[in-house]
Every structure is written in C-alpha cells, then in structure tokens.
C-alpha cells in the first residue's frame, strides 16, 4: 500500500518540566568559518547561510578571519553599554510589575545583536529596528531619560502619549519609529536604501526583525525589492528561538536556517553567533562594506536566545523549560564579552561588580528624574488638547467640533 499524504506539525524540542534540548542547533567551531572578500560571488559563499560565524571560543579568546580586532576602548564601551541596558531592562520590568508603567519588553540575552551592528554602522546610516533594540537607541543619542519618559507617557514623552511604551523613536539619530505591525520596517528600510543610492549617497540602511516575522509577507516583498534593485541594505533576523509562544520552527526555522532564504532571492546570507559581540560586529562590517561598494543587500541571521518573556503580557513558563536560557549553548553575551576582556587583561570581576553598581545607580537616579515629569497617577499630566495637534496640516471640521465640545465641558 502506498504511503498516505500527511501534514507536519512542528514541535519544540522541550516543554515545561522537561530538560532543555538544543540538539537542533548546528554550531561551528569559533574561527572555523572563512571570511570571503566582500565582492565574492554568491555561489561561492552559499555555505555561509548554513555555517555559524563565530569569533569567541569557549575560553573567550578571539579566533579566525572574522576577528575584527577591536581595541580595548571599543570593547569596554560595548560592555558598559550592555551593562547599562541590563540595568535599564531590570528596572523597567519591575516598574511594570508595580503598575508604574503599562507595558515593557526586555532584550535580555540579545544585547549583542544591537550593540555589535550599531558599532559597525556609521551614524549617518539609517536604522529600522524592532522592539528589542534598546541599546541601539542609546548608542544613537536617544537618552535614557527620554526613553523612560516615553514608557511613562508623561509630559516629556517624545511620542506625547500617542504610542505604546518601548516604541521609541529618534529622528535626529537616524533611528526610525518602531511599529507594532510586524515586519513593516523591512520594506521601509529597503525603500530608504534605494532612495539613498538614487541620491548618490553611500549611506546604507539596516533593519531588524524577529524569527517569527519572517513568515510575514513584508519579509518576502522586501527581499524581492532588495534583490532586484540591489539595494544597499542589511536585513537582520534576530532568531531568539521563540516568537511570543511559538517555537521558531513554526516560521520555517526547522527546515533551513533563516539566513538560507537569502540565496534563494540572490542575496548573500550570513548565519552568525548572535551572542558573540565580535561576530555581530564583524558580520555587519562585512555587509556594510559590501553594500557601500555596490554589492547590494545582505541577509544576516543572528542566532541568539530570548532570556526573558516576550513581553510583560507573556508567561514563558507555560511553554518552555524555566532553565532553558542557562542551557543555551551560545551562552550569555555579557558574560562572554566580559570574559574576553578579562582574558586580554583589561578587566576584572571587581571592576565588573563596580560597573554594575554604577549603572544600577545611574538608572535609579534617572528614573527619579523621569517621574518628576509625571507618571500614570501623579502629575504633571499631558495636556489633553494635544490630542488634536500634529494630525492634519489644517484641522478638519469634525475635529474642530470635538475640540470645541471639550473646551465647553472644561468651562462648566
């Protein structure tokens, strides 16, 4: 009898109460993957979508051709920023649990996917992030105080209370507004990159999405435009293994790496250790040089792990083992960066403890200042009249009537 057709339902390798199982991850030894020239032909580097670009080995020593050989000051600045983001994340999560803000999303465990690329890009390059790029916003000058005030939706909120918390924006720093509609930033980044090329600029665009967002139509449309028009853009997929509560296999990660979707469109794909700051920097540096020299787009998959919940609305203990992050084979990006600095003789455990205390105090002091501009329960409060502003060049009649109605109620 011939076999009957059947559908396949992806399943996570471990559920709550079970031992974590990352046997599905294909890893490469640090330094074992060669770094091709930036003008290499696609057919000569398709394997890079399946191998894993790694620089730091298990002893925190840099290995191989992808080693960007960052200096002491650059490494220390990256560690300082990573430590600050951890302190900020922790404070804002606790503030949400205490009812001080309505919503928050951590980037715990994914910091290197922002900091490395952010260091490798120019300030004039345009970034189209998703909601776990806290570090990128800080690097581009958004300011910790402004980010906190936004989460509080207070009188200093740059969105003036019109956007969900963690949906930051910073036009002056060339960082686009975060959108809750997943993957819209991909075609936006491609369009910006095409426009920059038409203008004769060598600035490029970079965008970030999660693994689950690769199932959205915008992902495929963006790759089509990027490939056809050879847009100077870096398209990052942050594969943190989970899209809210669904395992990355539901977006197709079980079949092939997300980076392998690039060659199918004629775009180079790089699969990169997302918890290795040196690797994320090096991969972005390579892709940026290729784009600026007319080589077109690159699709980068950062293999990482979401250390916390998807958001404060999520309970990951319902769908994955509680100790899964501690078992992740690529480790903690901050531990690895710190270990690398210690190995070079530039850092110590005591200096790390002092830095963490300093960053925690800085976050605490900044939070107190942010609250002075208002909270959800204590003034000053946003002027309700602002809801009618910045919507139309000329206010339409129905809004004029609503505004007049509000003024009449206030006079009573």
Image (cartoon, rainbow, N blue to C red):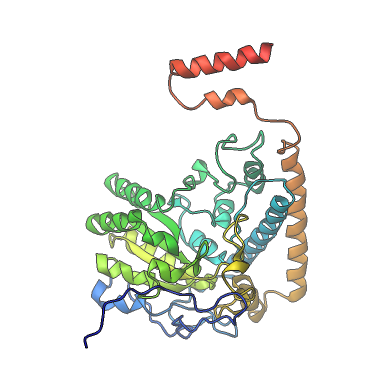
Up the image or down, 140 lies above or below 81; here it is above
How many marks the image carries: the answer is: 0
Residue at the spot 40% in from the left edge and 66% down from the top edge: 251
For the question of whether residue 109 can be seen, the reply is no
Direction bottom: furthest residue: 1
- Which quarter shows the N terminus? bottom left
For the question of whether residue 409 can be seen, the reply is yes
Given residues 294 and 136, the one toward you in this image is 136
Measuring from the top left, give residue 203's x and y in whole percent. 38, 52
Residue at the spot 33% in from the left edge and 73% down from the top edge: 7
141 sits left or right of 282 in the view: right
Residue at the spot 55% in from the left edge and 46% down from the top edge: 168
Image quadrant assignment for residue 289 = bottom left
Given residues 8 and 76, the one toward you in this image is 8
Measuring from the top left, give residue 399's x and y in whole percent. 49, 19
194 sits left or right of 239 in the view: left
Image quadrant assignment for residue 295 = bottom left
Measuring from the top left, give residue 72's x and y in whole percent. 61, 70
Measuring from the top left, give residue 188's x and y in whole percent. 37, 48
Up the image or down, 94 lies above or below 74; here it is above
- Which quarter shows the C terminus? top right
Up the image or down, 34 lies above or below 383; here it is below
Image quadrant assignment for residue 110 = bottom right
Direction front: furthest residue: 1
């Amino acid at each position: 009898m011939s076999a009957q057709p059947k559908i396949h339902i992806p399943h996570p390798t471990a559920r709550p109460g079970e031992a974590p199982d990352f046997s599905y991850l294909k890893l490469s030894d640090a330094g074992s993957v060669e770094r091709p020239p930036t003008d290499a032909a696609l057919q000569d580097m398709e394997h890079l979508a399946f191998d894993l670009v790694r620089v730091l080995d298990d002893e925190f020593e840099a290995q191989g051709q992808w080693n960007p050989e960052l200096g002491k000051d650059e490494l220390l600045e990256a560690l300082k920023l990573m430590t600050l983001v951890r302190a900020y994340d922790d404070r804002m999560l606790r503030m949400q649990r205490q009812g001080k803000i309505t919503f928050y999303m951590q980037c715990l465990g994914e910091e290197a996917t922002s900091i490395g690329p952010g260091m490798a890009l120019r300030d004039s390059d345009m970034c189209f992030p998703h909601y776990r790029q806290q570090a990128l916003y800080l690097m581009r000058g958004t300011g910790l105080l402004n980010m906190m005030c936004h989460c509080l939706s207070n009188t200093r909120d740059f969105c003036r209370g019109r956007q969900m918390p963690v949906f930051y924006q910073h036009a002056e720093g060339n960082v686009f507004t975060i959108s809750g509609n997943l993957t819209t930033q991909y075609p936006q980044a491609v369009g910006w990159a095409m426009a920059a090329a038409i203008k004769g600029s060598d600035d490029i665009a970079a965008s970030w999405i999660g693994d689950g967002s690769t199932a959205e139509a915008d992902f495929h449309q963006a790759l089509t435009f990027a490939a056809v028009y050879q847009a100077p853009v870096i398209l990052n997929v942050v594969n943190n293994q989970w899209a809210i509560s669904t395992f990355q296999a539901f977006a197709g990660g079980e079949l092939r790496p997300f980076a392998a979707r690039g060659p199918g469109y004629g775009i180079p794909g790089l699969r990169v250790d997302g918890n290795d700051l040196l690797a994320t920097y090096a991969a972005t540096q390579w892709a940026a040089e290729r784009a600026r020299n007319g080589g077109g787009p690159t699709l980068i998959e950062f293999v990482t792990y979401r250390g916390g919940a998807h958001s404060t609305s999520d309970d990951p203990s319902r769908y994955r083992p509680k100790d899964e992050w501690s078992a992740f084979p690529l480790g903690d990006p901050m531990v690895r960066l710190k270990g690398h600095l210690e190995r070079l003789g530039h850092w110590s455990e005591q200096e790390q403890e002092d830095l963490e205390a300093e960053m925690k105090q800085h976050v605490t002091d900044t939070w107190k200042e942010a609250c002075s501009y208002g909270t959800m329960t204590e003034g000053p409060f946003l002027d309700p009249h602002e809801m009618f502003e910045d919507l139309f060049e000329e206010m339409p009649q129905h809004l004029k009537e609503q505004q007049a109605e509000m003024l009449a109620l206030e006079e009573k």
